[in-house]
Image: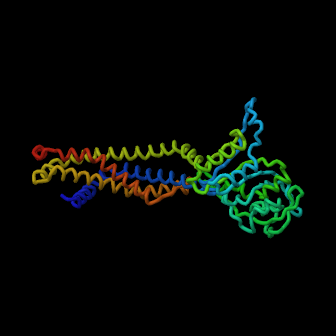
């Protein structure tokens, strides 16, 4: 019996024993559906995290922050350190070969007025690198330039939400607003920034990046000159020329800051590290999901083995006759293995359909992020076939080893 004939025999056996075939396939169907759903959830979560970090500047970005020393006794270097400053940002830009952008930030809440409208708004002092560092395109006008910083210019960019608050539908470019009674000319409006996490408390309607839209942006030198005097930074974001250069930029930055500060009173964190932390946190849930899928497939495999053993018992005389007329042990082994694979492949196909439905339900009803690909479906289907191969091997070997004389005498 060749492979085609074995496939036909497997199909005929399923057709003649429909109830047995359905019972055999149930575990495989549920297992494959679980595998599809688990892989879709894992891939959806990974893609959502990567998409979020791309909105915040991508994986090339490093965030540098001040560290706080709570010890009573500090060294002279710790006491003398000025913490992160605008001068540090300039030093990194001038001295780090791997750097692409340097985005120093100083934030203040100021009284903002336009005509009869008065608000207290968040004002961010920064430079021309900000739109590239934080992936913030300009919708109208222009952003801050090097010339604005060099000349301490009184120019301001508006976040879209603050633009609506101050101007409504009125054109804002070229208009003058006051920041703590100091006049500033509006030179541009930022594009609205949006991101909605799925699966967070069951809601997807909160824009987690709205704080970008609720900001005004002015040259950092103007911020220092008019509002802070000190050039101490609230934070510093830099990005490497490529993801591969992130480790090199980390070391270059640490060397520059250590040379300037004399003490490591700063912290450098990469987006890749945050992704790894999130992956570690979600690993526990992934293990649970995989355990559910594995148990379903294992149960399905045990059912396949038991039912095949029962089927072999019913067909001992048939096996004896086939061996008596020349079938080899290898022919018998292949026949029963193929029959097991036919059953699991059919269950796998049904499981794929059920998995697609479960994935859609998780996405639409529960609001969890999912992502399906051809690779996921192929992996799930091959897993089902593998279960049939593994759990069908023992019954097939038992059938292949039957003595033809004893098999023909079996009643």
**Coloring scheme used:** rainbow
Q: Residue at x 34, y 52 (%)?
A: 25
* Residue 127 coordinates in the image, percent (x, y): 74, 58
- Residue 145 against residue 347 in the figure, above or below: below
Q: Is residue 112 left or right of residue 350?
A: right
Q: Residue at x 12, y 46 (%)?
A: 404
Q: Is residue 337 left or right of residue 163?
A: left
- Residue 202 against residue 162 in the figure, above or below: above
Can residue 308 be seen from the camera position used here? yes
* Residue 373 coordinates in the image, percent (x, y): 46, 59
Q: Is residue 143 left or right of residue 392?
A: right
Q: Residue at x 37, y 58 (%)?
A: 349
* Residue 231 coordinates in the image, percent (x, y): 79, 49
Please name whichever residue, 26 or 265, is drawn nearer the observer in this view of the structure: 265
Can residue 200 be seen from the camera position used here? no
Please name whichever residue, 397 or 58, is drawn nearer the observer in this view of the structure: 58
On the rendered image, what quadrant is the N terminus found in?
A: bottom left
């Amino acid at each position: 019996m060749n492979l085609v004939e074995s496939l036909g025999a497997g199909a005929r056996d399923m057709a003649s024993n429909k109830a047995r075939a359905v019972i055999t396939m149930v575990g495989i169907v549920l297992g494959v559906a679980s595998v599809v759903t688990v892989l879709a959830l894992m891939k959806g979560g990974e893609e959502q995290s990567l998409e979020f970090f791309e909105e915040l500047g991508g994986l090339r970005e490093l965030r540098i922050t001040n560290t706080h020393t709570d010890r009573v006794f500090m060294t002279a270097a710790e006491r003398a350190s000025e913490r992160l400053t605008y001068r540090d940002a300039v030093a990194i830009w001038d001295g780090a070969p791997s750097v692409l952008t340097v985005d120093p930030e100083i934030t203040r809440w100021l009284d903002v007025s336009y005509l009869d409208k008065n608000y207290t708004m968040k004002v961010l002092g920064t430079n021309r690198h900000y739109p590239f560092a934080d992936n913030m395109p300009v919708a109208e006008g222009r952003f801050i330039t090097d010339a604005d910083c060099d000349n301490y210019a009184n120019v301001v960019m508006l976040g879209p939400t603050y633009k609506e608050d101050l101007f409504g539908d009125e054109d804002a470019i070229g208009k003058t607003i006051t920041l703590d009674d100091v006049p500033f000319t509006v030179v541009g409006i930022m594009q609205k920034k949006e991101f909605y996490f799925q699966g967070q408390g069951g809601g997807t309607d909160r824009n987690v990046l709205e704080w970008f839209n609720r900001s005004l942006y002015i040259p950092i030198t103007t911020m220092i000159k008019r509002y802070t005097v000190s050039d101490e930074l609230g934070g510093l974001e830099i990005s490497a020329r490529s993801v591969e250069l992130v480790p090199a930029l980390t070391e270059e930055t640490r060397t520059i800051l250590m040379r300037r500060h004399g003490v490591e009173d700063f912290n450098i964190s990469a987006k890749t590290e945050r992704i790894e932390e999130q992956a570690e946190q979600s690993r526990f849930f992934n293990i649970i999901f995989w355990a559910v899928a594995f148990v379903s497939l294992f149960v399905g495999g045990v059912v396949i083995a038991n039912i095949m053993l029962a089927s072999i018992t019913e067909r001992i005389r048939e096996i004896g006759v086939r061996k008596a007329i020349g079938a080899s042990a290898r022919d018998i082994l292949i026949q029963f293995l193929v029959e097991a694979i036919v059953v699991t492949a059919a269950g796998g196909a049904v499981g794929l359909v059920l998995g697609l439905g479960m994935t859609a339900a998780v996405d639409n009803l529960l609001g969890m992020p999912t992502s399906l690909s051809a690779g996921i479906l192929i992996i799930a289907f091959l897993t089902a076939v593998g279960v049939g191969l593994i759990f069908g091997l023992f019954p097939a070997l038992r059938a292949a080893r039957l003595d033809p004389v004893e098999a023909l005498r079996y009643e």
